């Protein structure tokens, strides 16, 4: 594997050398589509699969896209395109494959992709290939995707805590739940039933209020972190609240069999928004909040909510990728029937 110092020169060299690699075989041959997630069209049930991508960058990696005609009619005018994450250069971005392909035949096209240096944090990389062609029923399109994982998810949500949202009224300075130095009052939360390490039962889940001292990191400002979670259930319940009125996003649950489920949820602003905004459920309201100068805003409710996304109850959860929206703050998450 090459590690060129100048990507532009390397890619120009590769562009001059890369050509479509096409291999046709009958359905009974040993050649099979490369690993990846096939996509099908109603016209010809064309399968598109992407080979494993070597993420050990910085380097130029070779990727093979396999297109299989799984339908009864011949395919022709085949064009294959390939793309990786935003900013990753591909040579060529698309290839035209000459010839016609009988039922059961496969075509393979080779691409080169610029892989940057690995990030230390957990990262999900998605690659997409699309085939367009003429088939028995006219123009057809099929798309295949492949997800590659880099790094290790956090051991738990608590291990990913990166924000101080609860402080003692005698020491409010460490708090910064909303980006303006404000935070929940530990005393007022306790009066509302949320105590350190206490159980929170909501939406069928048994959750735990953060078991850390006031003034410590006690929640996750959601920005796409991956968090280990084991077990199974019909839904995943989140405990938290929002900053601003746009605290919504999509979480992706990865199962042990390699499949995923995605679901969108949201929280109201910790104050002022309607309590049922974004479909959330109110868990507790505390009186006032801690400001940098001390406790204040008495008489105004600062709240904690719950929300859930559906899961496949027949599958075992491996980890969760949180929404990429830092306005969503999470204190805990748990599986529920």
Image (spheres, rainbow, N blue to C red):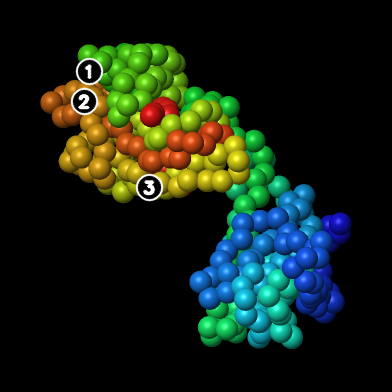
Q: Position of residue 268 (x, y in %)?
A: 26, 40
Q: Quadrant of the N terminus?
A: bottom right
Q: Nearer the viewer, mark 2 or mark 3?
A: 3
Is the C-beta separation of discs 2 and 1 under 8 Å?
A: yes
Which one is in front, 12 or 23?
Answer: 23
Give the CA distance from mark 2 to mark 1: 6 Å
Of callouts 3 and 1, which one flags the residue occurring earlier in the amino acid sequence? 1
Q: Which image quarter: residue 244?
A: top left
Q: Residue 60, can we see it?
A: no
- Name the residue beneath numbered marker 3: 264
- Name the residue beneath numbered marker 1: 192
Residue 18 placement, left or right of 100: right
Q: Which image quarter: residue 11?
A: bottom right
Q: Position of residue 178 (x, y in %)?
A: 34, 36
- Name the residue beneath numbered marker 2: 285
Residue 80 placement, left or right of 12: left
Of callouts 2 and 3, which one flags the residue occurring earlier in the amino acid sequence? 3
Is the C-beta separation of discs 3 and 1 under 8 Å?
A: no
Give the CA distance from mark 3 to mark 1: 28 Å
User: Where residue 273 is drawn, which disc sits there?
Assistant: none
């Amino acid at each position: 594997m090459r590690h060129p110092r100048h990507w532009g020169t390397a890619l120009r060299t590769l562009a001059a050398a890369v050509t479509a690699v096409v291999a046709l075989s009958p359905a009974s041959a040993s050649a099979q589509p490369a690993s990846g997630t096939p996509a099908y069209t109603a016209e010809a049930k064309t399968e598109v699969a992407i080979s494993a991508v070597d993420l050990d960058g910085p380097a130029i990696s070779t990727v093979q896209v396999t297109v299989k005609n799984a339908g009864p009619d011949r395919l022709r005018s085949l064009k294959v395109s390939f793309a990786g994450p935003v900013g990753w250069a591909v040579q060529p971005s698309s290839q035209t494959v000459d010839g016609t392909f009988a039922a059961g035949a496969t075509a393979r096209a080779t691409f080169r992709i610029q892989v940057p240096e690995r990030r230390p944090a957990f990262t999900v990389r998605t690659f997409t290939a699309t085939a367009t062609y003429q088939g028995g029923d006219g123009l057809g399109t099929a798309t295949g995707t492949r997800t590659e994982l880099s790094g290790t998810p956090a051991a738990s949500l608590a291990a990913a805590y990166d924000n101080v949202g609860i402080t003692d009224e005698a020491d409010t300075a460490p708090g910064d739940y909303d980006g303006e130095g404000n935070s929940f009052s530990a005393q007022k939360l306790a009066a509302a039933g949320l105590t350190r390490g206490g159980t929170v039962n909501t939406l069928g889940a048994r959750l735990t209020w953060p078991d850390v001292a006031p003034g410590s990191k006690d929640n996750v400002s959601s920005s796409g972190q991956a968090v280990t979670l084991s077990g199974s259930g019909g839904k995943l319940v989140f405990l938290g609240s929002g900053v601003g009125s746009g605290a919504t996003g999509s979480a992706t649950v990865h199962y042990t069999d390699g499949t995923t489920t995605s679901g969108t949820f949201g929280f109201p602003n910790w104050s002022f928004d309607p309590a049922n905004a974004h479909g959330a459920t109110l868990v507790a309201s505390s009186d006032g909040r801690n400001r940098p100068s001390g406790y204040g805003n008495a008489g105004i409710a600062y709240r904690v909510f719950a929300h859930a996304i559906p899961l496949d109850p027949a599958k075992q959860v491996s980890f969760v990728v949180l929404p990429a929206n830092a306005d969503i703050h999470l204190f805990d998450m748990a599986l529920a029937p």
